[in-house]
Image (cartoon, grey):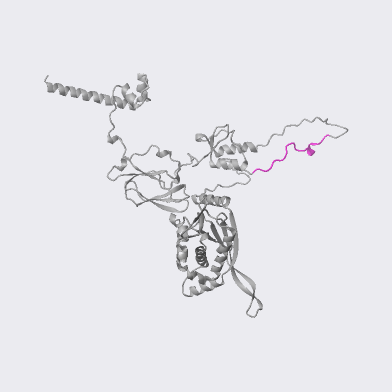
Amino acid sequence: MPVSCQQKERKREGEGKGGKMAASLWLIHRCGGKINRLLGRNLMRAPLGSLSQAVGCKFLHTTPETLGIPAVKILMPALSPTMEEGNIVKWLKTEGETVNVGDALCEIETDKAVVTMESSDDGILAKIMKEEGSKNVRLGTLIGLLVEEGQDWKQVDIPSDASSEPVTSSASTASSPTLPLAHKIEEHHGKEQFRLSPAARNILETHGLDASHCTPSGPRGIFTKEDALKLLEQKQKPVEAKPMVSSVPLRQAGMPLSTPSASVPISASRPPVTPVSVPGRPASMNPFTEIPASDTRRVIAKKLTESKTTVPHAYASADCDLGAILNLTQELAKDDVKVSINDFIIKATALTLKQMPDVNVTWNGEGPQQLQSIDISIVTATDQGFITPIIKDAASKGIQEIAASAEALAKKAREGKLLPEEYQGGSLSISNLGKFGINSFIGLVMPPQACILAVGGSRTELTVVEDEDGNEKLQQHQLLTITLSSDGRVIDDELASKFLDTLKANLENPGRLALY
């Protein structure tokens, strides 16, 4: 046989052996368990290098077609300082659509408002990991994937840990109950650690139960609400009264036997225990319905608890005469200028902060911080709770400009369209409940702010005044009660009193407001 023919034949034999070897490797991966049992080996549990040596060959290199296209991860961002999780309201891009830097990707409901998330990368939206309506998506959770332009976005490489994110989605069904987002780990000395669900923790703390000797039934060792209810049910079971044997004879000195009607109960009376609703059982004496708390409500509860427990509050009140302001608003109304008493209060408060910069401070946890800008937060009620949109640099604005800004911000707040920079920060908050018929009330300082001004409704009072001749007479006055709550760590009582006195003077003399 010619040399060239021999070489071609050897080449065909080599290709055939290589093809057989590749097929053998494929079978080992595809049916590893069966081949291991046939050969009596534990090949599939060995590392790749030892596996190649065991079969006397080398692994074939992986071709690009078998690999997924690497992607840029889109993570749930922190859109507010207090945000811990968010809800995906709407995706503004679809899979396969080109995305540029700054494009709006989706709308996310935070603990304060609905905010549009913008893209920080160019590419193609290859995969939406969290669909519209996903609830309680934790910060840092993977919500989408981007690939570079020109690549096949359908072949995107989906991370293997994408499904293990701590997320609760609205798409979950009743047959697969969702776990709480966070479980606190209980540690008892000498006992094994276990985790409590929020509902279980609430039941244990409310009824003073000890779960250290109980076995959790939830997944991953979680002590669930059902476990807590079983423990409570065991505690509420009445102790069976055991017959007491008396050492005294039944009949002594002619004493008659006690009749059953006159018998005294052996067990002492137990204090009433508040009934707890148990799933699948009839309603208790006081049935209730659990209302799911929105993200906004949870943040409000957290902030108010922080305010009441960590801020040493001090309070001071003063009555202001609104006669001059009412006359001025009537004159402005003739010129079709519509402003409210609250607009004057905002302007007067900002002016007072400018006159007394020592009050324009916040507490950062370690000490006071002097603020350079005077920004007034207006407490605004919404369907989800209250929020505090901010009028920036209020001291330099006129009454009309303040009125327009307050109206626009209040509308955006009620529609849930405030941007983070429109409600974060602030020098001082103002809460006005006058339109609800409240004469006076006390507000809670919202950290890190140091003050909040509570404004009640105006009222008519008769006071005794002297005329030019020194004769006393009755005169009507429109009075307004304002109450300043301040953080005693940065504002002492003397400074708070001076601030309130200056604010009263500015309100009773609105002409001063035009000088600044």
Q: Position of residue 311 (x, y in %)?
A: 56, 52
Q: From the viewer's side, name the closer residue of 473 and 362.
A: 362
User: Horizontally, is 396 left or right of 311 in the view?
Assistant: left
- Quadrant placement of the N terminus: top left
Task: State whether residue 448 appears in this view.
Answer: no
Q: Position of residue 50 (x, y in %)?
A: 34, 24
Q: Main secondary structure of the magenta part?
A: loop
On whether residue 496 falls in the magenta region, the answer is no
Q: Position of residue 400 (x, y in %)?
A: 46, 68
Quadrant in the picture for residue 49:
top left
User: Horizontally, is 214 left or right of 149 in the view?
Assistant: right
Q: Position of residue 35 (x, y in %)?
A: 35, 22
User: Horizontally, is 98 left or right of 300 in the view?
Assistant: left
Task: Residue at 13% x, 22% y: name it.
Answer: 5
Quadrant in the picture for residue 38:
top left
User: Horizontally, is 74 left or right of 273 in the view?
Assistant: left
Q: Residue farthest to the bottom?
A: 469
Task: State whether residue 324 appears in this view.
Answer: yes
Answer above or below: position of 261 versus 18: below
Answer above or below: position of 481 versus 265: below
Q: From the viewer's side, name the closer residue of 342 and 33.
A: 342
Q: Residue farthest to the right?
A: 253
Quadrant in the picture for residue 440:
bottom right
Task: Residue at 53% x, 56% y: name it.
Answer: 450
**Range of magenta residues:** 257-273
How many numbered circles are shown?
A: 0
On whether residue 269 falls in the magenta region, the answer is yes
